[in-house]
Image (spheres, grey):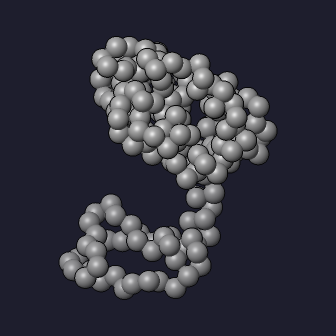
Amino acid sequence: MVKKYSAGDSFGELALLYNAPRAATVKATSSCTLWAMDRTTFRTILLQTTSQKRQLYEKFLDDVPLLKTLDNYERAAIADVLEAEYFDEGHEIITEGQPGDKMYLLEEGEAEARTGGNVVKHYKHGDYFGELALLNNKPRAATVVAVTKCKCVSIDRKSFKRLFGKLDGILQRNTREYDVGTSKG
């Protein structure tokens, strides 16, 4: 047995996505009710959801000053890789000294950067943080804490390198604004 499924789980989506034969046989171990979906319906739903997500994030990305220089295609490419993450008040979003694997854009709420326990920067809607660790391949330079409940969207390291090449110069220039005590991390 490779995997056991429970109520609410799904399987077979890879075959629908990639028009490939099933990779495994699934057998019921008890009486159950299953719902099935054909490839056309699955792809239609997937395309609609992806399109809605892209439109939602493109609207948000218009509010991010750093991204104003990008064209619609470039903003759409970024919107496609964004992942929503939610943080409760007081939660450490990134931690000083830890390796960085994501950059964050603050969509909702407020956060603050701290170094040595001192608040060095406040973040609000449209602000970003975590880029230094990705740009410089160094540990996080600050801890960023959610001051209120926050919704961030994140970009992983691989996507960041691929998509932010055009902005590398702008990001590097922006990092010069920071001194040792006010780094974004």
- Between 180 and 41, the one lying in front of the other is 180
Q: Look at 35% across and 35% down and name the residue there.
A: 97
As displayed, is residue 52 above or below residue 150?
below
- Residue at image location 52% in from the left, 85% down from the top: 21
Q: Position of residue 163 (x, y in %)?
A: 66, 47
In the rendering, at what x and y percent does residue 59 appear? 66, 32
User: On screen, 154 above or below 9?
Assistant: above
Q: Position of residue 134 (x, y in %)?
A: 52, 42
Q: Is residue 52 left or right of residue 179?
A: right
Is residue 146 visible in the rendered image? The answer is no
Q: Residue at x 49, y 44 (%)?
A: 137
Q: Quadrant of residue 55?
A: top right
* Front one among 11 and 107: 107
Answer whether residue 141 is visible to the viewer in this image: yes
Q: Position of residue 178 (x, y in %)?
A: 54, 20
Which image quarter: residue 63? top right
Nearer to me, 9 or 169: 169
- Up/down of 45 relative to 119, above or below: below
